[in-house]
Image (spheres, rainbow, N blue to C red):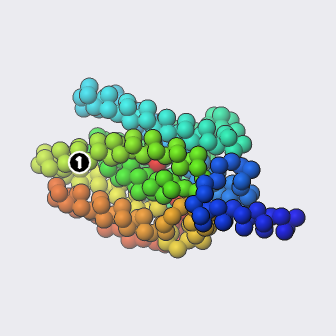
Amino acid sequence: MAGTTDARETALLERVATGEPIESAADMTDDYRDNLIHLMTMQADSELAGAFGYVPWIMKAPSTSEMLAVAQISKDEVRHARVMYVLLKELGVDVEARVQSFNFSLRVDESDIGTARAGDDARVNIFYYPIKTWSDFIMFNVLMDRGAGFQLQDVENSSYGPWRRAMQGIMKEETMHIAHGDAWLKRWGGDPAHHDEVQEALDRWYPRVMNIFGRPNSPKNALYRRYGLKRRDNDEVRRAFAAEVGELCATVDLKLPPWKPDWEQLPDDAWIAG
């Protein structure tokens, strides 16, 4: 039996190395399948929790045109979650029972929960924080959607074919969400009447987002890369994200707040979605 397992692992790794996509559970080892489900579940739960966090801002947006924009973003996020849950269902996950068992509206009021979890779902913990102001909403688009984009770039080249193809449509919509946040960042960040408020939101959310990428050189990330489920080290993605955010904020004289990593406290791996 061990010989059969080793042969399946060898065959799978050969396909990953040559770029031949894995298309079905029949092509997977148990370890590959478990890690794939873990990552896709983190994305799916984060997409849905993010959508629910945005919904109140349909009503509270500053104009009817922005009400429509927020409604579209929320709809996109629910669609992303649905796409991911369909993929998970194909791998044997009881999706409906899972979704019904979790309180995706759960939010915490603590100023900073670090890397702690507040619920039993698999969402990245930043989705437990409430969005209290329009500047918070802007910063979610700027930081979270951008962070999701950086991490999901790896999925566009994932070894799992169905996930890779699903990301084509998701990434197009995430790009629009980022553009929405960037436009408002420049509009309000460059306006003396709102600049300080936007800076406060940046100070609040930037450290939280920097915490979600996972530790550098983590064994879990190395395993994901071995299976072609990720392509880069956690810290490589985080540094690329931070550099782009810094350049964007500098255009309207916003300053990135200090972030001092506590590597021992950061999660071994993380997955986000905007």
Judge the density around disc 1: few (<14), some (14-19), many (≥20) Cα neighbours within 10 Å: many
Q: Amino acid at mark 1?
A: Leu
Q: Residue at x 74, y 57 (%)?
A: 30
Q: If the image is split into quadrants, where does the N terminus sit?
A: bottom right
Along the viewing direction, whichever of 121 and 183 lies nearer the viewer = 183
Number of marks drawn: 1
For the point 67% across and 39% down, which residue is it?
A: 89
Q: Residue furthest right?
A: 1
Measured as percent of width and height from the top left, residue 114 is found at 47, 60
Residue at horizontal 36%, vertical 61%? 241
The residue labelled by disc 1 is 185
Q: Position of residue 27 (x, y in %)?
A: 71, 53
Q: Nearer the viewer, residue 119 or 94?
A: 94
Position of residue 186 relative to residue 263, above or below, is: above
Asked if one can make out residue 161 in the rendered structure from this viewpoint, the answer is yes
Q: Residue 202: name its quadrant.
A: bottom left
Q: Residue furthest left?
A: 192
What's the residue at 60%, 57% (across, down)?
20
Establish if 258 lies above or below 78.
below
Percent from the top left, x then y, of residue 162? 59, 46
Q: Is residue 123 visible?
A: no
Q: Nearer the viewer, residue 243 or 163?
A: 163
Residue 274 locus on image (x, y percent): 43, 46
Q: Is residue 172 left or right of residue 91?
A: left
- Circle 1 sits in a helix, a strand or a loop, which is it? helix
Tell me: 56 left or right of 27.
left
Relative placement, left or right, of 262 versus 202 is right
